[in-house]
Image (spheres, helix red, strand yellow):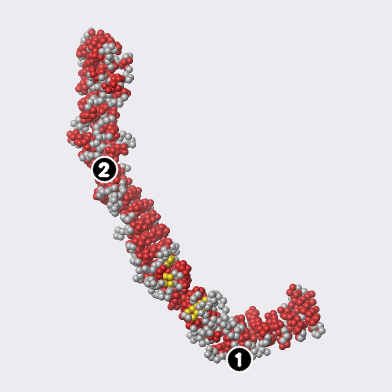
Amino acid sequence: MIGKWKNLVDTLQTDLRSVSSEAKRRHPAVKDAAERAILKLRSLSAANDKHINEVIARSDDVIQPFILGCETKNPKLILISITCIQKLISHDAVPDTSVTIIVKTLSDMHRQEIELLRILQTILLLLTSTKLLHGETLAQAIAICFQLHSSSEHTIANTAAATLRQVVAVVFDRVIQEGIRQNENASAENEKMGVCATDAYLLFQDICQLTNWEPPYWLVGVKEVPRTFGLELLENVLVSSHATFTDQKEFTFLLKERVCPLIIKLFSPSIKHSRGGPKPSTTSDSNLFSVCVRLLRIVHCLLKNYHSELVTECEIFLSIIVKFLDADKPFWQRTVALEVLHQVCSEPALLSDFCKSYDLQDQSSKVFHEIMGAMGGFLQSLFTGNTPASQNGVASPIHLGQQPPDSIIFSLGHTTIMLSALPSMRSTFKPLLLSALEKSEAPPFTDGYTLGVTYAAILHIINSIFQSHNLAESNSDDELMSTVSEMTNASWHGLLAALSLLLDAAQDETARELVLKSHQDFASLCGSLGIDVARDAFITALCKASLPPHYDLFITGVKHVEDDKHLVMLSAKNIQCMRSLLSMAHCHGKILGTGWNMVLRTLQHLTWILGLVPTDNGQLVPSPSADGANVVKTAALSADLPIICSMLSRLFQSSQYLSEKALMHLIQALCQLSAETEASTSREKSLFSVGKILETCLVNLSRLHLLWELVSAHLLTVCHEKYTPRRTWGALALTKLLRAAIEADHSLPLSQNPKLTTSLLGPLVQMCEIRSEDVRLKQLECLHEILNSRGHTLPLAAWPPVLYILGSVVTAEHPSSETVVRQGFLSQHLLVNDFLPLISPACIAQCVEVTGGFGLQRAELNISLTAVGLLWHISDFLYQNHDKITERNRENEECGEIKKQEIVSGPIVALRQSFISHISFDTLWISLFQRVGDLCIDVRPPVRKSAGQTLFSTLSAHGDLLKPQTWNIVLWKVLFPLLEEVKCLSSTAPDESLERPETNTPILVHHSRNTACKQWAETQVGTISGVARVFQTWRKILFTLDNFFGAWELLLRHIESGALHPTSEVSTAALSSFHELLKDNGTHEGAPELWDVAWHTWHTIGHRITHTYLSYPVEGGEDLPSQNFLTSLMRIFTLIYPKVASRFTREDMMNFSKVVRGVAAVPIGPDLPFVLSAQDCNLTPLQSSILVALECVDQCPDTEMSLAAHVIMEYLVLGTLSYLPPPVLGTPALDLLGKKLAHQTRMSKSEESVYIALGEQCISSAVEIYRSRKTEDSIIRTHIMENIVKMLRGPLGLKYSCPSQSTWLLCHSTLLSVIEEGVDTACERASEFEGMWIELGKCLEEFLFGDHRPPVNLTYEERMSHEQLDVRMIRLIQEQILPRASHTPPSFISHVMTLLNRGSVHATSPQPLTTAELYNPLPATLRATDPDAINTLPLREQFAKSCFETLLQFSFYKASSSSGDVSKLALGTLLKRCQEVLQNYVKDEKLSGRCPLPRSRMAEIAFVMRAISSLIGSLQARRDHMTQIDVEVWDHVVGLYPYLIDCVTCNSNEVRDTLKEALHRFRDLLVPPKLATIETDGSDKTEIEAETEIARPEEVVPDLNNHSDPSIIDQEGVSSEPVSPKNGNSEGEENKKKFVITETELKTVDSEVTENEQNSVLNPEG
């Protein structure tokens, strides 16, 4: 058994025992029934049934004792019984048959007035716990409740009232449950009302009857009910059972037939009542307030829940309520009517139904309009005093200062109303009067409560209309939307008046905030519904409230405060209204439409008042420098100022959420406001409109295509204004907006939307027409940022406008400032470096023009230099992208680059045309070269230099891309005009020091560039070099041009002009270019005329340079041609000659010789240490180049005419530089030489050494050529050997007097070599070498016996080596000349014998020593300081031996006439020499006394003795052949005998030994020889010619050196005192002059050459 049932059984058993115990005596029936029940319960308990309550309910055994107990009059027993009955009822354990008995029992108890409260409880339990009470039983039970409600005891009456309310509710709830059951079991038969519905119907009908004080039909026994209680029961039923009354027609009938008439009837006394009328005469209910309140509550219920069923009745009710608001009604009545209206207005659907049912119907009254009018009138009456607060003693006025601290005050005029709290849509409003059901009279209330109710009603009306509008929009309900529109039209006048009144009267911020919120909402609603008049009216009211009263909203562009004495003060109300205005515009901007004009005008006034200025993004912030004299800054203003600024920013930022139409309204309003501001005459104009245009557009970039045309046109107009701040701001706004638009993400990328791109850039292009610097700077900054951030995304259509803008910066018509140029160049630099691959070929050409323009501008030098670098970058780009550009041009030609319709018509037609057109690749190059060429003649030297380098580097690097016709244009339109222009400008440049124009002070510049002339010279250098480099680099391409010869000739003409320029820098560079140009790579092999032009150019340069110097010498050498220049000139010849060798004539060779001699004659000057050749430290580069040039002429194989002789002659002429000064070259006339020497400073040792080195090198080269070509006819005919000997004669004759000792040593070896190489040829062609032998004799004599003394510092070893050189010369005679005496001139042989005779005797001077010189060979000072010096005198012993041996060797020639002559001459000379030595020795020996003669004299006499012995031995060998011995020889030999006898007395052992040997030899000579005749064997000879041969020296001549005398062979320690030549330097100069090669001394070069030709070759000046 479940626990609750067990407890029930236990409780019942306990109660039954109590009943049984109480009734055992007086009520045995009760006792017996109780005992049976106990047994019953025990049996049930033992059965353990889960549903024991149902078992109990099946029989009345258990309940019977309790019913019987209630019938007794025992209170205790009745209490126990009624309590147990309630338990059984609550546990649903009452049998169905017992319900009626229970009700009857309760009725009896009611009549007996026993346990009345328990009766009410039991009835309520029967209704709520069981469903068995219906019909009459139910009516009886309810009647008991009504009867108890009339009890005099308040507890019973109140409990009965509460029970009745619950009973009525339960009855009607049963109807609902019954209806549910019927719906579940729906059938056609169930059309009748159910049992529960019938009970409810009868109950409700009787309630209406009782309320109307009429007898009931169903509740028998109920006589009357208080009207107030009946109205309450009706209200409860109507409120809780809405479905019952609307779903079942019977109940709807009751509403129309019972309830509404009852209400109307009961309203009649109230309607008729007025302040001055009679009071109601109702006797049953004199409490008019209680009835009126309950009636209005029912009316509200009917209006709210049953208006669709009671359309007509509700119209009446609404009219009644509106009439309640009349001024003649009691104040409480008007207030309670307002409470009802407040309740009604809080229902949006209800209001819309009322409007649809009445206002939209033609035949119906305008209920909604009347309601709004009545409410507005009532509100106005509150502040106009038409409602006395003391009326009916329910209200009293409240004045300022009397209110509680937390109260809310509304004050207008002299009326002040206080509200304890503000109503709102979210707060729960409890009506004061409608809730006072327990009051019989109206409770006290204030005007503030009434105002609050009215306020809340207005708020709810606005909210209801707003909600209905939202619902209609969400459901797309057009019918509802039209209803809302009607409601709005009907209400806006009243609402505007009411809200404006409340806003004016509100003194509290919270109250104003609520009013302003309503204001905003309704204005938004009007805008949404398209009621523009209403919307603008609300906006205007709000705008007026936002500004001080004296402000006129319709005046713009000027400040209202013109008198500083009148200050502007913004009240808290103004600030709050302004915030509300901003909030409304922020939240409802999409519906403002034309209302934006008023809003923006108000905001502009606000910014003026607050001193707000726009930032770069258009946002407003307080200006740090704003003048606050015209505004009083309160604490509230200071606190709200940041908020207002933030709201202003958010307002325009929220425009991104506006529709396109709304956004256009906003932008149009801003533009209109800006135009009005511009048209004003104020000196200070507002920036508000411009700043907000920027801010609005920035947040609407995705829709900028809708606004751009309007906005850009207006901002351009602003940029033209004269008022600087607005103009600057217009430029800022336009450029910032453009940057943002370019950088924004578009649905179609800009790279694919050229139309949009050109539309955006159009205004930026139009800004070029504005000359204001601030505008241009903004324009260029914008362009740079666009390129920097989005340049890679720009389409092709964007680049022509970009380049046009940049080009306008450097246009010649309107020069820009330095700042503008610098800013513009940033973009150009970025474009060239990063975006060339993105632009079309036509734009590249335009880019070249613009870049060139930046190079030509004069504002900033660095920009010009950088622009030149950009042009070089462009050239690299063209080179690297040749194929791409060509392909793009081809595509453009086929299909067009972009269709014309895709490009909007911009302000510059040329932009579009230049964009569509295409341009060839070569045209791009030509444009580039022309622009760089223009920069090459800029007035600024750095620009010229940089441009020149760029031009020629570009041509050199990328010329292979140019076609021949393009090259032709480049040559004749760029390069040659550039050369000519630079030449002209250089020639006219002033040669004055540069000065600053502003201070006239010198500019600190290097001296090489301190004049304009020098700077132009540098430019000319670069230009000539560059053009030559271009020709050299691309000669293969240029050679194919038709007019290449003309170009070549013109170029060489310019080079010639440059080489002859007075500035060494230009001339040297011209020659370098000439040299560079002639570097052959095989291109000109088939074009000899080109090389002929080059040769003539070279000759012209060389001739004019050398002729000028040689003819017009200058002092100091300042204008001398530089060594580098001359070196280059000679090197160039080595390039030219191989190409012209085949056509090189004698005249050309003579011209060449003139140039070479002139070049070599130019002094080196002070730059000698810097010009020495790296290869040979003794030769300058110029001298090396001269040698190379001569070698080139000699070795060139292409020449038809051998020029070796000419080359050798040039070498010989240059060889004279080894001992003669340079000016003598080419100037044989001594007078001219004197002039040269007069103007020439003395040559330094270093300079002299390089000329010596050159001369020596030339001598060696000449001999080398001669040795290789000595047998050639041209060499022989031109007497080259003779000229060589003549040239060598000079330094050999000077010997120690030569400037360098190496010279005569070289000449010595050279002479030996030449003689050895050429003697055979000279003997073979003796007739052509006669002059040579003469020169050779002179050369030998001057060298061996010249007047030259060795230098003081010459060592002994050096003296001995020099003596060996003399010996080598004698051996040359001995071995090469004398054996060929038969082929040499006799005079030469005689001269040679004379020389040998002179050399065979020891001597320290050319002449024989005197006695004084013999014993005093040194000066006295030297003898005093060095006594041994006398023994160091140089005696050429070996030389003397060699001469004597040679004489001895050739003393026995007797073969032929010529040989005999040589032998005779040699022998005679030898004997004569011996005699002289013997004589001198004997004489000196006698004079010396006891002092020995010098060792050299003793060696000499010993050598002579041996020679005599050898000679006698040779004669003795030929005693038998006397025909071979000349008689005179015998006589000479015999004649020596006396002299030998004189020498017997000498003291020298060596001499005595040799004398003894010689005397022994004379023994054989005492017998004369026999003459013999030799017969021939029949031949033609009469003498044996075989005997005429000379005895070989090794066989006949004894070895004179083979002796044992130590005095002869010991020569160590011997030294000689050098003897200075006589007359010092004057003798050297005379000797030098003696060896000058003149034209009369030179032989002819060729037998066919005419006399004039000879003169021109050998003497250029002749």
Q: Are marks 1 and 2 in contact (CB under 8 Å)?
A: no
Can you see residue 1428? yes
Q: Is 283 or 187 nearer to us in this picture?
A: 283
735 left or right of 1481 in image: right
Quadrant where the N terminus sits is bottom right
Q: CA distance from mark 1 to mark 2?
A: 149 Å
SS class, disc 1: loop
Judge by depth and name the residue closer to the eye, 336 or 62: 336
Q: Which residue is mark 1?
A: 283
- Give the percent coordinates (x, y) of residue 1063: 26, 44
Q: Residues within 10 Å of mark 1 (few under 14, many from 20)?
A: few
Check disc 1 and give the amino acid type.
Thr
Quarter residue 1595 falls in = top left
- Closer-to-camera residue (375/1193): 375
Residue indicated by mark 2 = 1094
Q: Select label 1 or label 2 by which is in front.
A: 1
> What residue appears at the point 22 percent right and 27 percent down from the top-left corner?
1623
- Would you identify the image quadrant in which residue 1433 lies? top left
